[in-house]
Amino acid sequence: MSQERGRGAGRPLAWLALGLGILLAGILFPMDWPGQVFPAYRAAYNFVFSPVWMHLLMHTLLFAGLAFGLSGLARFIQERRGQDAAEAGRTALAVLAGVLLVGALQELFQGLSRGTLGWAVLPDSLFDLVVDLVGGLLGLGVYAAWSTWHAAGRRLALQPAGEGEAHENRAGGG
């Protein structure tokens, strides 16, 4: 326990915060906005992002990454406060609320940059928010799987040498 809270204990949090900050900036910045000024950028942007599948893939991946990072941040804070993982349900809801908030802000900034706010774009914005939420659920699932795998690896690493072999022998493994 003391090794985890030693000299480098703040580094994972700093890297996580930096990664989340960069991801948030990338999500919230209206990426098509420079295309209003630079025709070459607009042509390249439209070539890459105009297919619907690419739009869906990027929204899903960006918001999966956001949910994964927010889950890691929430877990880090819970460990620092001495809370257990029993708060997983509330944490997941808070992460999904954060995903929806960022998605709504992204749609707002995109609409402001294009000058297209109003009822006419509401169906497209709601569709994007659903895709963002699916990405958030994917990120939560990946984080849950990763943290389970990571915790199992930590338990095995902390197990005294030979104890795993004795368990296998008792279970009839040899």
Image (cartoon, grey):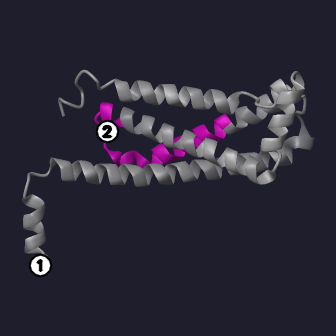
Residue 3 vs residue 112, the one in the foreground: 3
**Residue for point 67% across, 33% down:** 27
Image x and y of residue 37, in percent:
88, 21
Please tell me which residue is depicted at 49% across the width and 54% down the height of the picture: 141
Task: Name the main secondary structure of what is drawn in magenta.
Answer: helix
Quarter assignment of residue 78: top left
Q: Which residue is mark 1?
A: 172
In this view, the mark in front (1 or 2): 1
Residue 46 in the image, given as x and y percentages of width and height: 84, 40
**Helix or strand or loop: what does disc 1 sit on?**
loop
Q: For the residue marked with disc 2, what is the amino acid?
A: Gln
Residue 34, visible in the rendered structure: yes
- On residue 83, the disc is 2
Question: Looking at the picture, does residue 134 appear above or below residue 11?
Answer: below
As measured in the structure, the alpha-carbon distance from the residue carrying label 1 to the one carrying label 2 is 38 Å
Q: Is residue 112 visible?
A: no
**Image x and y of residue 80, in percent:** 31, 31
Q: Amino acid at mark 1?
A: Gly
145 relative position to 109: left or right = left
Most foreground residue, 87 or 14? 14
Q: Earlier in the sequence, mark 1 or mark 2?
A: 2
> Which quadrant is home to the N terminus?
top left
Disc 1 + disc 2, Cβ < 8 Å: no
Q: Which residues lie in the magenta part?
A: 78-102
- The quarter of the image holding the C terminus is bottom left
Q: Residue at x 12, y 75 (%)?
A: 171
